[in-house]
Image (cartoon, helix red, strand yellow):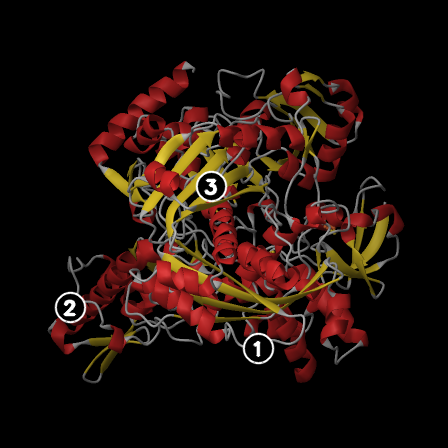
């Protein structure tokens, strides 16, 4: 039994401790906004915030999440949309959309500590997030737009 | 061939003969539309279905039944623009992707399938007409209610008015549904359009996609569902052993089943054999699959296959005579009398589509009915295979098409659905099958590998008088390794018979056979060379290799005869106004021939595909002979009328990323009978830091829309390698560039 907080709610889950947080979110808690893409820390579509850090949830065993405070895409805009979500809508960033939750978690995490990122800082912060559809120009534009709206 | 296929094929051919043919890429395809019309909006209660494309609720909520898949290309929004333009409704609509009605059959294909850049051109007339019909039905309902003539009523903004009388579409929906629409309503003229071709119409699915609420089939759960992981055999092999007991010792594991090899009565000659492990959660299923320690065996010649052997076989194919795909003038005479000749050989590798949502499907077989959920481009094929596997009539089957996490041609095949149905039948529970990335990347369909030998003859005045393009490699239609039920369905059609007879695979020669360059003597030929790697269409299909071959060689030819690469193309396209205009537009906007910063060079490539001529000019510099820095990409296209300017630009942007991937990164090598790259640690995609700056220009036109999604990237590779030559003098004749030690800065 492991107890953790997800999007402000406490959950106690009874799963094998080696289960990645990703699959606990998706299969046990039904929070399917966090996606599976590679399972090896290459694509970033499983990105969530844990204790304020940006992590790949495919790499974090639930056994190591006891007491953790996790925020997923479902909890990002706890009080309406987060500015980065609004910016992604305004810039029509999404194509297939499957990478978008991970992009948003990574971008929101960067904006927390760096509200006015340069192009280079965006490149560094977003380097772990693949978009196979290829929406990179608009992702960059949306991050700048969110930065100036905040 | 088993009994089931025979029966189904016979039934199918009879049906198709009666139903007449659809047309794909100008070729006759049998019509395979649904045998039974499903309800259009199954999950909606209340309100009314006005026609198969639109449902209006009493609170005025409009649901658009989009006949095309939404896999990122924006069809949900672009197709709604066409319908909404005529329907005179509020812009906002809920997107739905219903399946199984004849109205959803792609008119250019004959099946409910999204591919070949057909969504916009294929539904262009259909949806505007259906929108106008739905508007007429609303007006007729209002006119009847008010006892006035329909001509005294008008509609706009989801409201019908007549004098001081007003009624919303929601109020009228139930009565409107019973009206008979005019057969051929008058459509608006372009001057009257308020939506089509106008900017500012945002994607309808953005909110869902930024909140994580958008559901792909991998996100769906149903009561009693078990999760499944799969291990497919490497190509050409069979299962030697697996350890059921070990798998079942993993907590949560329920069943270990074999599909394929040991179930031939159901799994025909189609899918590779596989072991499927079901469990309470996906993680447990994957652990179980690992514990099962499945051992595979391949025939010796497959087990020893590697990239070098593949390359040698492709080149041996080029030494053979091949089958003629096109013959203009007298090529042998022209090349024989040429005063100078030039020849070069090129090669491209296997390439995987790698949409970020891995293949998956949820199937719930209940004995007398079947319900499925799939992220797919091809629900039409889903019905056909579901019927073949279960023996159920199509009216007992329903396929929910969800949002799709990338398709790129990979999801034209539906083998993931076949496996899931099979598993659900075996374990008697709903099964959600999810491929691991490794299974997705290494064990299924790829863009084929090809080589080409290009030869040109030049006469004494410096004119290029002879052109030969010889392609060798697997054929998506002709090779056994695109073994799928879908392909088998086409057996016996004129489309397939023509290819068998000529020996020319349609997609292997696509873009080679139909070049726009006006050479007096042209010879295009194809040699089929097979390897046991499964193959399928990839965005752009045959053009992805042939544009690289043709446009690289054009550049070599220009250099050889001392002409400017743009001017040589300009001369050869003089009789093709749309192509010429596109070429010239790109050159003009890129300031071709103008001065560039020191170390920078331009490369140009042109190609005509899916009826959309496209030209890219790339400006780049190369550091240390290895690090390629792309400064600017100038793109020009004539894709007819642009219905949705925002999504047009999104596709152009996507094309840049796909072009960079194709040019620099995404190629498979084969080692000891397997694809060597199985995940993104070795099969890399471009990252945001590598995104290049681009601009795009369209040729002014009044023509109907043509393709955009497919032609977006295949001119990028030759434009880049031609620019690398201009910058460094180094010729690149094979992709990707990471195999030449070159990388994207
Ligand atoms: S699924 Fe976690 S990084 Fe790809
Ligand atoms: S939007 Fe499809 S992968 Fe990014």
Write down the quadrant of residue B119 in the picture: bottom left
**Residue assigned mark 2:** B144
Q: Position of residue B700 (x, y in %)?
A: 34, 72
- Asked if the residue under mark 2 is in contact with the one under mark 3, i.e. CB atoms within 8 Å, the reply is no
Local packing at callout 3 (Cα closer than 10 Å; few below 14, some 14-19, many 20+) is many
Instruction: Mark 3 vs mark 2: give the one in front.
Output: 3
Q: Is residue B481 left or right of residue B735?
A: left
Q: Is mark 1 within 8 Å of ligand 2?
A: no
Chain letter of mark 3 equals B
Residue at x 30%, y 24% (from the top left corner): B11
Q: Is mark 2 within 8 Å of ligand 2?
A: no
Q: Earlier in the sequence, mark 3 or mark 2?
A: 2
Residue nearest the viewer, comparing B532 with B406: B532
Residue at x 37%, y 44% (from the top left corner): B112
Q: Earlier in the sequence, mark 3 or mark 1?
A: 3
Q: Is residue B470 left or right of residue B597?
A: left
**Residue assigned mark 1:** B595
B495 relative to B154, above or below:
above
Residue nearest the viewer, comparing B531 with B269: B531
Q: How many marks?
A: 3
Label at residue B412: 3
Residue nearest the viewer, comparing B502 with B380: B502
B168 relative to A38, above or below:
below
Residue at x 81%, y 49% (from the top left corner): A59
Question: The N terminus of chain A lies in which quarter of the figure?
Answer: top right
Give the Cα separation between the discs numbered 3 and 2: 46 Å
Instruction: Mark 3 vs mark 1: give the one in front.
Output: 1
Q: Earlier in the sequence, mark 2 or mark 1?
A: 2
Give the Cα separation between the discs numbered 3 and 1: 46 Å
Residue at x 64%, y 16% (from the top left corner): B299
């Amino acid at each position: 039994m492991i107890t953790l907080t997800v999007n402000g709610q406490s959950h106690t889950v009874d799963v094998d401790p080696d289960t990645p947080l990703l699959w606990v979110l998706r299969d046990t808690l039904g929070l399917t906004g966090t996606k599976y893409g590679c399972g090896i820390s290459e694509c970033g579509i499983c990105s969530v915030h844990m204790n304020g850090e940006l992590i790949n949830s495919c790499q974090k065993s639930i056994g190591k999440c006891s007491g953790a405070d996790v925020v997923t895409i479902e909890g990002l805009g706890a009080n309406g949309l987060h500015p980065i979500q609004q910016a992604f809508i305004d810039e029509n960033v999404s194509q297939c959309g499957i990478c978008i939750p991970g992009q948003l978690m990574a971008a929101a995490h960067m904006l927390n500590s760096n509200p006015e990122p340069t192009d280079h800082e965006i490149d560094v912060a977003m380097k772990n997030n693949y978009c196979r559809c290829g929406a990179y120009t608009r992702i960059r534009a949306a991050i700048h737009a969110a930065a100036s709206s905040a | 061939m088993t009994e089931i296929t025979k029966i189904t094929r016979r039934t199918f051919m009879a049906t198709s003969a009666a139903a007449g043919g659809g047309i794909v890429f100008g070729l006759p395809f049998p019509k395979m539309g649904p045998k039974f019309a499903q309800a259009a909006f199954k999950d909606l209660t209340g309100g009314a279905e006005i026609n198969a494309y639109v449902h209006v609720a009493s609170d005025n909520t409009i649901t658009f039944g989009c006949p095309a898949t939404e896999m990122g290309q924006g069809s949900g929004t672009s197709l709604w623009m066409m319908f909404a333009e005529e329907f005179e409704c509020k812009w906002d609509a809920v997107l739905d992707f219903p399946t199984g009605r004849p109205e959803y059959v792609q008119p250019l294909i004959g099946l409910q399938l999204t591919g070949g850049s057909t969504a916009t051109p294929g539904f262009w007339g259909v949806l505007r007409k259906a929108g106008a019909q739905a508007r007429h039905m609303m007006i007729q309902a209002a006119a009847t209610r008010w006892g006035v003539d329909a001509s005294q009523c008008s509609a706009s903004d989801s409201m019908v008015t007549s004098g001081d009388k007003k009624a919303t579409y929601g109020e009228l929906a139930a009565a409107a549904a019973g009206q008979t629409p005019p057969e051929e309503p008058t459509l608006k003229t372009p001057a009257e359009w308020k939506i089509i071709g106008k900017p500012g119409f945002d994607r309808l699915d953005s909110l869902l996609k930024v909140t994580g609420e958008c559901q792909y089939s991998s996100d769906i759960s149903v009561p009693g569902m078990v999760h499944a992981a799969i291990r497919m055999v490497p190509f050409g092999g069979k299962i030697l052993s697996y350890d059921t007991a070990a798998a079942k010792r993993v907590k949560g594991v329920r069943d270990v089943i074999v599909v394929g090899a040991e179930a031939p009565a159901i799994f025909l000659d189609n899918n590779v054999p596989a072991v499927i492990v079901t469990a309470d959660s996906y993680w447990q299923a994957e652990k179980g699959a690992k514990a099962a320690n499945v051992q595979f065996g391949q025939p010796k010649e497959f087990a020893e296959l590697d990239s070098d052997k593949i390359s040698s076989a492709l080149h041996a194919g080029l030494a053979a005579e091949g089958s003629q795909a096109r013959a203009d003038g007298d090529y042998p005479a022209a090349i024989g009398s040429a005063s100078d000749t030039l020849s070069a050989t090129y090669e491209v590798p296997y390439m995987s589509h790698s949409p970020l949502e891995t293949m998956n499907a949820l199937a719930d077989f209940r004995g007398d009915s079947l319900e499925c959920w799939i992220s797919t481009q091809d629900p039409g094929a889903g019905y056909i295979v579901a019927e073949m596997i279960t023996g159920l009539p199509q009216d007992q089957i329903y396929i929910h098409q969800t949002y799709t996490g990338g398709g790129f041609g990979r999801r034209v095949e539906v083998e993931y659905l076949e496996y899931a149905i099979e598993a659900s039948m075996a374990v008697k529970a709903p099964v959600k099958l999810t491929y691991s990335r490794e299974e997705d990347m290494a064990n299924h369909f790829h863009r084929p590998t090809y080589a080409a030998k290009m030869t040109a003859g030049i006469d004494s005045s410096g004119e290029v008088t002879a052109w030969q393009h010889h392609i060798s490699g697997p054929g998506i239609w002709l090779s056994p390794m695109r073994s799928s039920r879908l392909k088998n369905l086409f057996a016996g059609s004129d489309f397939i018979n023509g290819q068998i007879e000529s020996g020319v695979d349609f997609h292997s020669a696509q873009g080679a056979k139909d070049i726009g360059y006006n050479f007096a003597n042209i010879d295009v030929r194809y040699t089929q060379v097979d390897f046991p790697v499964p193959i399928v269409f990839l965005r752009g299909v045959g053009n992805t290799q042939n544009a690289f071959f043709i446009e690289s060689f054009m550049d070599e030819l220009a250099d050889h005869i001392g002409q400017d690469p743009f001017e040589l193309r300009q001369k050869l396209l003089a009789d093709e106004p749309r192509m010429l205009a596109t070429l010239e537009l790109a050159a003009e906007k890129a300031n071709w021939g103008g001065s560039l910063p020191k170390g920078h060079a331009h490369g140009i490539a042109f190609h005509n595909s899916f009826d959309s001529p496209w030209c890219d000019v790339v400006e780049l510099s190369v550091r240390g002979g290895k690090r390629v820095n792309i400064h600017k990409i100038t793109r020009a296209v004539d894709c007819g009328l642009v219905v949705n300017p925002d999504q047009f630009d999104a596709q152009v942007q996507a094309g840049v990323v796909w072009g960079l991937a194709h040019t620099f990164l995404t190629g498979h090598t084969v080692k000891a009978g397997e694809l060597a790259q199985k995940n993104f640690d070795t099969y890399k995609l471009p990252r945001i830091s590598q995104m290049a700056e681009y601009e795009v220009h369209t040729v002014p036109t009044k023509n109907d829309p043509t393709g955009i999604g497919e032609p977006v990237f295949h001119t990028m590779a030759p434009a880049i390698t031609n620019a690398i030559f201009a910058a460094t003098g180094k010729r690149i004749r094979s992709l990707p560039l990471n195999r030449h030690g070159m990388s994207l800065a």
